[in-house]
Amino acid sequence: MEKLAMNKPSMGKNSAQHKQAFDEPLWWGLFSAGGVCFAVFLPAVILFIAVLLPLGLLPAEVLSYERASALLFSVPGFLFVGAVVCLPLFHAAHRLRHGMFDISVGNDALNKKLMYGGAALVSIVALGLVVAGMLG
Amino acid sequence: MNTQQISTKQISVKRYLPDSSAESYWQQYELPVDDSTSLLDALNHIKEQLDSTLSYRWSCRMAICGSCGVMVNGIPKLGCKTFLRDYEGEIRIEPLSHFPVQRDLVVDMEIFLEHLAAVKPYLIDDNPVKPYDPQAPETYQQSPEQLARYKQFANCINCGLCYSACPQFGLNPEFLGPAALTLAHRYNLDSRDHGKKQRMAELNRHEGVWSCTFVGFCSKVCPKHVDPAAAVNQGKVEAAKHTLIALFKG
């Protein structure tokens, strides 16, 4: 009887319980949030900083050093960096990880650590710099 | 109307006859067609008139049984729902991708059936079933609104086209895959069912919903418009909720 039960393909309650992917909802949540930020905020940021400002269509002083640092080193600045740097980074990391799996590059366990680890590292540095600026 | 106008078309079939050769090869057939000739009609014509050694599965001829799935020019299709009038030039017929081929167009679907069974695709009720009483028969009650929640996902005919379309199933056959995850979602959404907890353990594995990268080709090829991609991604939301609840409960 026991042997029979073992031969059943992944039907045992324990077999599935033991393989629960507790981390995946986190990566997927960050990926989803990052996707929204990519779609909603980044085009506006690129339009403003990379198109309108260099073309001289906005007054130069809107992002003067004093104004820019005052904007960045504040709570809204912290949220801005989170929305246009950190979350999109996790979005990109998720896509890269799955893209590498799709073309069979490396192994998924290592790719996960490299991709999400890299995104986490850059996020911590970016947010850390904002916090340091707020305190300093 | 010129529906009866007969012309000839050439189709190429990928043959695999393990008794005589270990290698597969292409074979061309020329056959008469009109505007109403389906691919299944063409295969039947070949079998009956030209070459009785050709093997393929079929049964209902009306997109209900899900037996006649094949690759047509690289796209998974039901033979009975595919019409030769829609194809100009070469028509290449192959067995469904991502499944082991047994003979000609016949594939081994065992792993697909295992994945279906793994998600417990039936109503699970914690309450013991009472003996049937003809004087006061008890039925599962369900309102039209409750039916509408899952009805679309209940139209699956288990043809396996979505598994041939899914690149993730191609990379990892352990992935439960579009149809099984859709069926799990269909029962999770059913007001008469109480088995969601048991199914979530299967869904929330790496080989469950999390192997899906939302390519969406499964929904494109589905002959019954079930939209498995939507079901799988709604399943991701459910799996994420399930994990959060599990974390708080410890």
Image (spheres, rainbow, N blue to C red):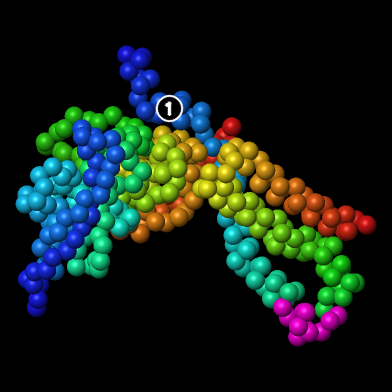
Q: Magenta: predominant secondary structure element?
A: loop
Examine the image and state in which quarter residue B33 appears. bottom left
Give, as a three-letter code, the residue at label 1.
Lys
Q: Is residue B124 above or below residue B155?
A: above
Quick one: B140 or B218, which is closer to the camera? Answer: B218
On the image, the x and y values in percent for residue B70 come to: 26, 50
Q: Is residue B232 left or right of residue B158?
A: right
On the image, the x and y values in percent for residue B230 come to: 41, 55
Q: Which residue is mark 1?
A: A13
Quick one: B60 or B46, which is closer to the camera? Answer: B46
Crowd rating for badge 1 (residues with CA inside 10 Å; few <14, some 14–19, many 20+): few
Q: Residue at x 15, y 45 (%)?
A: B54
Q: Is residue B36 visible?
A: no
Chain of the residue under label 1 = A
User: Tag 1's secondary structure?
Assistant: helix
Total numbered labels placed on residues in the image = 1
Q: Residue at x 37, y 51 (%)?
A: B165
On the image, the x and y values in percent for residue A26 come to: 60, 45
Q: Is residue B106 left or right of residue B192?
A: left
Quadrant location of the C terminus of chain B in the rendered image: top right
Q: Is residue B110 visible?
A: yes
Is residue B19 in the magenta section? no
Which region shows up in magenta? A51-61
